[in-house]
Amino acid sequence: GDSVTQTEGLVTLTEGLPVMLNCTYQSTYSPFLFWYVQHLNEAPKLLLKSFTDNKRPEHQGFHATLHKSSSSFHLQKSSAQLSDSALYYCALSSVYAQGLTFGLGTRVSVFP
Amino acid sequence: GGIITQTPKFLIGQEGQKLTLKCQQNFNHDTMYWYRQDSGKGLRLIYYSITENDLQKGDLSEGYDASREKKSSFSLTVTSAQKNEMAVFLCASSIDGNYAEQFFGPGTRLTVL
């Protein structure tokens, strides 16, 4: 079956520094990969979605590149902001499974 | 745009009690989902429905029932609440079942005494 691995449970960093959240996956079929962000007491919202044509999706300064050779979809931002403090989920959707398969999530705390 | 509403926002139950959570969406989406969110465990799929009156089990369906009487609503029932259980139940919808963005509701926080 499908699986998503996020290796960091908690990432703490200082405002202005770069951030990278790891995401690797296993899937029998070519999946779509997503990053969802959930701020405190809010619903998860889509942050990024992989493209089929190898374009790099970007949103709110975040970007991620799907590397099929390494089965990865790492999330990056060059300069973290205080408002980036949230829970980030990597998720996978494949053709034969309904719903999304989520990783365990990475909590990001950005300090001044 | 649209919105997903979940009721109640907080639900406190007793061990063994049957509890029902409700979800409404006005996106006119075909597919709806129920996920359970536990701290450190991510989101796990309980049930989903691809159209009115359709029900499909997810990986975590044991101990739950679901109902989709209308396109816009999807209910989840905890058949027998477990003592000391605490979790957030998230409802979501998407235009179709594969590859489409899912939109989430704010969640129902369940506490079982």
Image: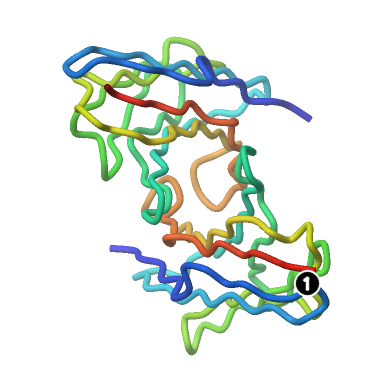
Residue at the farthest bottom position: A69
Residue at the farthest front position: A112
Q: Residue type at mark 1?
A: Ala
In the image, A108 versus A96, the foreground residue is A108
- Count of picture labels: 1
Quarter the C terminus of chain B occupies: top left
Q: Looking at the picture, how far across and down is residue A88, in whole percent?
A: 58, 60
Q: Looking at the picture, how far across and down is residue B43, in whole percent?
A: 42, 48
Task: Give the left or right position of residue A110, taking residue A34 as reference.
Answer: right
Kindly indicate the quadrant of the structure image that contains residue B67: top left
- Residue drawn at the location 63% of the way across and 25% of the way down: B4
- Residue drawn at the location 77% of the way across and 81% of the way down: A17
Q: Looking at the picture, how far across and down is residue B24, in whole percent?
A: 57, 17
In the image, B80 versus B60, the foreground residue is B80
Figure colour scheme: rainbow
- Residue drawn at the location 67% of the way across and 20% of the way down: B26
Relative height, residue A105 to residue B81 (above, below): below
In the image, A73 versus A22, the foreground residue is A22
Instruction: Give me the chain letter of mark 1.
Output: A
Quarter the N terminus of chain B occupies: top right
- Residue drawn at the location 43% of the way across and 10% of the way down: B69
Other-residue count near label 1 (Cα within 10 Å), few / some / many at <14 / 14–19 / ≥20: many
Kindly indicate the quadrant of the structure image that contains residue B19: top left
Task: Give the left or right position of residue B103, taking residue A61 as reference.
Answer: left
Q: Secondary structure at mark 1?
A: loop
Relative height, residue B85 to residue A15 (above, below): above
Residue bearing mark 1: A80
Q: Looking at the picture, how far across and down is residue A40, in whole percent?
A: 63, 44
Kindly indicate the quadrant of the structure image that contains residue A27: bottom left
